[in-house]
Image (cartoon, helix red, strand yellow):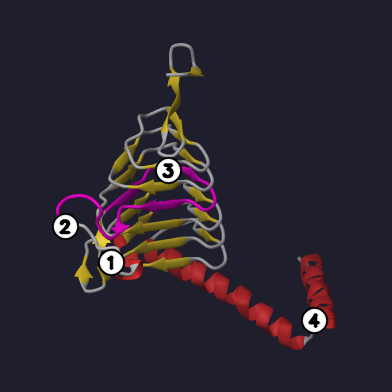
């Protein structure tokens, strides 16, 4: 214990010598804020084992439920929007246990996003149940309306099953259901259902392989 304290003191003195007292105080404040934020969020979300990277942005905590051992890298953007441009919404984001998300991913809901247990999500992934504007049906959005001022809608619930792996740079737009054990290849755009135990890729995504429990191999469909 004394050795650890001595090492910490030595590192602190070295930092001060190299960077000065001002930057040392800033760094201590930054690290204290990270610890306090993690503690407060873990209590609010009732999520033991919560790990959040720097620059994370969480909004709408009253509509978000996260299971234990949730790990997210820096830049996570997790938002449940109950109001936008005068519209009222009833969002819900539910994330199961042991979910890991890499850097700079974005999950946004005005309806429902449900992510199962043991899901692995890569970097720069977008998961959303809505669009800015409507582009199908009889009431479509004019291109003269700036995108940021278009009403949210045009999507629907997103359900991601247990043990799903989502690669880097994937975009997922509901309504859709990704079955348990599926794999979404990097850079794919998912705008349709994905069968369980299926590898999909491409824009828009299409099946590449399916797991055959008889042969215990991933085989071409």
The quadrant holding residue 86 is: bottom left
- Is residue 121 within the magenta segment? yes
User: Which residue was labeled with disc 2?
Assistant: 139
**Magenta span covers which residues?**
112-138
Mark 3–mark 2 distance (CA, rounded to whole Å)? 25 Å
Residue 169, percent from left and from top: 51, 48
Q: Main secondary structure of the magenta part?
A: loop
Q: Which mark is residue 19?
A: 4
Badge 4 crowding class, 10 Å Cα cut-off, few under 14, some 14 to 19, many 20 or more, is: few
Please determine whether, in this image, residue 88 is positioned above or below residue 174: below
Mark 1–mark 4 distance (CA, rounded to whole Å)? 48 Å
The quadrant holding residue 40 is: bottom left
Which comes sooner in the sequence, label 4 or label 2?
A: 4
Which comes sooner in the sequence, label 1 or label 4?
A: 4
Please determine whether, in this image, residue 136 is positioned above or below residue 74: above
- Is residue 182 within the magenta segment? no
């Amino acid at each position: 214990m004394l050795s650890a304290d001595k090492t910490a003191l030595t590192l602190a003195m070295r930092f001060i010598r190299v960077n000065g007292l001002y930057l040392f105080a800033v760094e201590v404040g930054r690290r204290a804020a990270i610890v306090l934020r993690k503690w407060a969020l873990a209590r609010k979300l009732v999520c033991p084992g919560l790990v959040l990277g720097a620059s994370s942005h969480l909004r709408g905590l009253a509509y978000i439920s996260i299971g234990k051992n949730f790990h997210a890298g820096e830049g996570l953007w997790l938002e449940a929007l109950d109001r936008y441009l005068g519209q009222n919404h009833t969002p819900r984001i539910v994330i199961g246990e042991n979910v890991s998300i890499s850097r700079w991913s974005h999950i946004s809901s005005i309806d429902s996003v449900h992510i199962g247990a043991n899901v692995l999500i890569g970097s720069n992934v977008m998961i959303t149940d809505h669009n800015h504007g409507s582009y199908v049906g009889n009431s479509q959005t004019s291109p003269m309306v700036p995108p940021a001022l278009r009403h949210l809608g045009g999507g629907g619930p997103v359900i991601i099953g247990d043990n799903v792996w989502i690669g880097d740079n994937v975009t997922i737009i509901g309504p859709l259901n990704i079955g348990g054990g599926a794999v979404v290849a990097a850079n794919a755009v998912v705008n349709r259902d994905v069968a369980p135990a299926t590898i999909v890729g491409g824009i828009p995504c299409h099946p590449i392989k399916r797991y055959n429990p008889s042969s215990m191999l991933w085989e071409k469909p």
